[in-house]
Image (cartoon, helix red, strand yellow):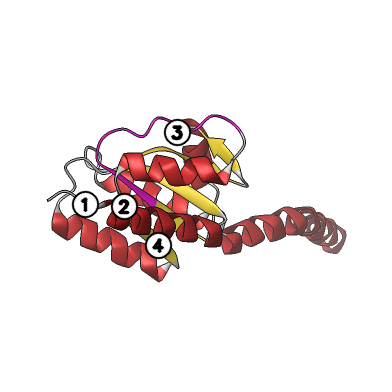
Amino acid sequence: MARTKAQKKEIIAKVQTLMDGATSLVFVNIHGLKLEDATKMRKALKADKVGFFVAKKSLTSLALASKKYEGTAPELVGEFGFAYGVDLVAPARGVYEFQKKLKDQVSIIGGVFENKYMTKDEMVAIASIPPLPVLQGMFLNVINSPIQGFVMALGEIAKKKTA
């Protein structure tokens, strides 16, 4: 069923509103995505406070044109949707997890990160950034490593002196 001009304007306004509230957008090709997989993906993304919206490419392009992001917009191909969220990395990470599980059904085609258009490869690189607790653990390990080595060296010296 064809949409009226009023309906199209409403969709464009909704897409613009979603983009206004988001700090990061991930454009996703969802060609061949089954309904049950789409439902699982939406629930998993929602748990991470990430939204997912499906709109026509032409209407989304009109909404993107009004935003004036830096760089060149990626070509929106296939059946299209986008993930959005306040966290900079969560939308990309969430979609990337499903891209790994559903190889032929979900694929990242680009996005917007810090008000700049990003390519597919750049968005995949962003998605591979570990979560904050993991990064904090890695940092603590780096700080702890020299101290641990020093303590082990002192322990060996103490063993030699007592022997």
Q: Nearer the viewer, residue 123 or 111?
A: 111
**Dot 4 or dot 3, earlier in sequence:** 4
Task: Please give the range of residues in magenta.
Answer: 71-82
Q: Which numbered tag is attached to residue 3?
A: 1
Q: Which numbered tag is attached to residue 120?
A: 3
**In the rendered image, which residue does mark 2 sit on?**
8
Q: Where is residue 141 in the image (x, y as percent from the top left)?
A: 68, 57
Q: Which numbered tag is attached to residue 51?
A: 4
Residue 73 magenta-drawn?
A: yes
How far apart marks 3 and 2 lie (CA) works out to 28 Å
**Dot 2 or dot 1, earlier in sequence:** 1
**Dot 4 or dot 2, earlier in sequence:** 2
* Three-letter code, disc 4: Gly
Q: Which residue lies furthest to the left in this view?
A: 1
Q: Position of residue 132 (x, y in %)?
A: 60, 61
**Is there CB contact under 8 Å for labels 4 and 2?**
no
Q: Which residue is drawn at 38% across and 50% down?
A: 82
Q: Position of residue 66 (x, y in %)?
A: 53, 44
**Is there CB contact under 8 Å for labels 2 and 1?**
yes
**Is there CB contact under 8 Å for labels 4 and 1?**
no
Q: Which of marks 4 and 1 is in front?
A: 1
**Is there CB contact under 8 Å for labels 3 and 2?**
no
How far apart marks 3 and 1 lie (CA) works out to 31 Å
- SS majority, magenta: loop
How far apart marks 4 and 3 lie (CA) works out to 19 Å
